[in-house]
Image: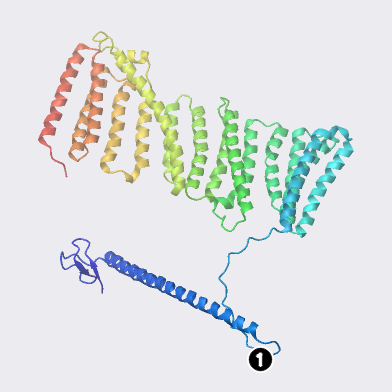
């Protein structure tokens, strides 16, 4: 049992019976906090006592050490003044106290370090000399001499690291191995000049040379346990697939697949890094995986860009090949998302979803030339609803990608709706001269969207409700539904070629409904939202009044209707001012 200050009134409370002042029951959290505070204060006092004790002992040690040194000097002085030849009992002086630890001296420079530095610089200069030799002195030798000389230099540079490793000159071995790996593609070039592999094109021969270089680098690294050959293997494997695509004469879709294959190869190396298995990994391997991640990202981006060109083609067969290429490029970040964690996983999922969205929208555009608006909205709605079925960061990334696409489609739909409303209002001008007769025909002449526009709006509202799901309060469900109903009231009668009076009636009824809902929202405590709904109702009323300008009788009826609706809403708002429970 312990006491603690009551969080409510500050009276000393008991951990069993609670607070005697306000009657608050015992609070376990407050009890534990009070006990922890007391224990922390006790430990602080103990630490202070120990520090004081250490200071006292240190002062006593210094005094004893001074007295010891003084006596030791007296003892040695007496020993030196004794007569020579006198046999006395050998008395060993008392042991000296251990000296205070002095700071460690910096380690001396080892000869191996100097050798590493000098041989590393020598290896770099040797590599530069080899490149200069190939560029400048190439014409001074015959074909066979060039090939043999390059092959001999490369073999020597690859043999020397094995000897240097026995003397633990690792840095020098790494440098010479890197230069040797650089000379392997040059050997391939020399062999090509000498007439080897002339049956292949330059692209095919280059792919073979880089594949051989990558295999030799990987094998050499596995045997010698050196690090630099792994970087050489990673870099030389990058151009293999693009060179094969060039050799085969593939189209842009084929080039896209080539870069996708290269990115997939990099993904194999990056996989442990994405899974967070970098703890305990050598630093060079982490750098190697990071380099593979950068190269793989660039490969995926370039593959996607190359795939967009055939995807944009109006020829279905070409567009289908482009769709396959873009989907293949998007599959690489999708697979990487399986291994990744956290925010990285969400970003990879978003990148993969972008490929799916782009391909889906493009194929929908080609498959339904007469129903493109409705088909695009349907595709966007299906994709975003499917994205809600995912979980975790993948769901967030997919929703960002699909939501962005749906926003673009929504802007397109809004533009068509604005154009339809302009046609509807423009038909009523000049004022009182066009009349109600022939209203529908004139709207068609000015141009308006067909039935796809209201159908797309209704489908978009339904998708929004499905995506929001149970996260919306009932009043917000009504808000979303009313937004859709208001948009439909604006465009549906015009798009469906309804009679003139139907356009006015639907807009007026919807304006009245929005006014009633604004009163409801105001009574439940949301005045700002209520003001928005009232403004939306006014806009609908003004639209109906603008359409009424086509006929004088309709204008009079419209004005009286607006006055009547305003009076009804004012009376209703005055009679029920309180909140509705």
Compared to 80, does 114 lie above or below? above
Quadrant in which the N terminus is drawn = bottom left
Name the residue located 57 percent from the left edge and 55 percent from the top edge.
Answer: 278
Q: Quadrant of the C terminus?
A: top left
Instruction: Spot the residue most to the top.
Output: 433
* Residue linked to disc 1: 88
Residue shown at the point (39%, 30%) measured from the top left: 410
Residue 244 placement (x, y as % from top left): 71, 37
Foreground pick, 483 / 10: 10
Please tell me which residue lies in front, 67 or 474: 67
| Rendered view: 158 above or below 36 | above
Q: Where is residue 143 in the image (x, y as percent from the top left)?
A: 88, 36
Q: Where is residue 26 in the image (x, y as percent from the top left)?
A: 23, 67
Could you say which is closer to the camera, residue 237 or residue 256? 237
Q: In this view, does 85 lie to the left or right of 536?
A: right
On screen, 347 above or below 169? above
Residue visible at 34% across and 71% down in the picture: 42
Quarter of the image where one finds residue 51: bottom left
Side (left or right) of 361 relative to 545? right
Residue 35 visible in this rendered orientation of the protein:
yes
- Residue 475 placement (x, y as % from top left): 25, 40
Q: Is residue 541 left or right of residue 151?
A: left
Assign a secondary structure to mark 1.
loop
């Amino acid at each position: 049992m312990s006491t603690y200050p009551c969080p409510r009134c500050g009276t000393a409370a008991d951990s069993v019976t609670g607070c005697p002042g306000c009657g608050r029951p015992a609070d376990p959290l407050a009890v534990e906090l009070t006990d922890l505070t007391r224990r922390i204060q006790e430990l602080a006092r103990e630490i202070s006592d120990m520090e004081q004790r250490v200071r006292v002992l240190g002062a006593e040690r210094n005094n004893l050490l001074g007295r010891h040194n003084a006596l030791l000097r007296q003892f040695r002085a007496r020993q030196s003044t004794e007569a020579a030849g006198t046999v006395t009992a050998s008395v060993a002086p008392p042991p000296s106290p251990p000296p205070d630890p002095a700071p460690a001296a910096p380690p001396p420079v080892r000869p191996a370090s100097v050798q590493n530095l000098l041989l590393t610089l020598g290896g770099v200069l040797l590599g530069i000399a080899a490149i200069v030799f190939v560029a400048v002195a190439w014409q001074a030798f015959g074909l066979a001499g060039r090939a043999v000389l390059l092959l001999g230099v490369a073999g020597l540079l690859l043999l020397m690291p094995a000897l240097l490793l026995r003397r633990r000159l690792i840095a020098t071995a790494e440098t010479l191995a890197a230069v040797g790996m650089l000379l392997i593609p040059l050997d391939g070039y020399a062999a090509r000049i000498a007439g080897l592999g002339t049956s292949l094109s330059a692209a095919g021969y280059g792919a073979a040379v880089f594949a051989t270089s990558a295999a030799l680098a990987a094998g050499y690294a596995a045997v010698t346990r050196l690090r630099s050959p792994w970087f050489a293997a990673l870099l030389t494997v990058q151009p293999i697939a693009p060179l094969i695509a060039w050799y085969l004469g593939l189209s842009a879709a084929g080039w896209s697949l080539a870069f996708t294959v290269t990115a997939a190869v990099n993904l194999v190396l990056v996989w442990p890094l994405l899974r967070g298995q970098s703890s305990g990994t050598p630093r060079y391997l982490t750098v190697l995986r990071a380099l593979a991640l950068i190269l793989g990202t660039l490969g995926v981006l370039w593959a996607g860009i190359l795939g967009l060109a055939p995807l944009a083609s109006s020829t279905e067969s070409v567009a289908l090949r482009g769709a396959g290429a873009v989907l293949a490029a998007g599959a690489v970040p999708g697979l990487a998302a399986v291994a990744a964690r956290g925010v990285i996983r969400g970003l990879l999922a978003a990148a993969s979803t972008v490929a799916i969205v782009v391909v889906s929208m493009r194929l929908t555009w080609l498959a339904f030339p007469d129903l493109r608006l409705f088909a695009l909205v349907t595709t966007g709605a299906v994709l975003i609803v499917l994205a809600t079925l995912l979980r975790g960061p993948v769901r967030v990334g997919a929703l960002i990608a699909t939501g962005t696409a749906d926003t673009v489609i929504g802007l397109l739909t809004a533009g068509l709706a604005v154009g339809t409303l302009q046609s509807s209002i423009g038909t009523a001008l000049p004022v009182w001269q066009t009349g109600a007769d022939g209203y529908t025909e004139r709207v068609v002449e000015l141009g308006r969207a067909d039935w796809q526009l209201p159908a797309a709006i209704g489908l978009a509202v339904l998708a929004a409700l499905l995506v929001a799901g149970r996260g919306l309060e009932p009043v917000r469900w009504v808000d979303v539904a009313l937004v859709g109903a208001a948009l439909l009231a604006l465009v549906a009668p015009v798009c469906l070629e309804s009679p003139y009076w139907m356009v006015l009636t639907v807009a007026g009824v919807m304006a009245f409904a929005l006014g009633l809902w604004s009163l409801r929202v105001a009574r439940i405590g949301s005045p700002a939202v209520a003001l928005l709904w009232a403004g939306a109702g006014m806009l609908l009323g003004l639209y109906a009044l603008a359409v009424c300008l086509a006929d004088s009788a309709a204008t009079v009826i419209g004005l009286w209707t607006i006055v009547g609706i305003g009076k009804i809403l004012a009376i209703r708002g005055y009679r029920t001012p309180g909140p509705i429970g």
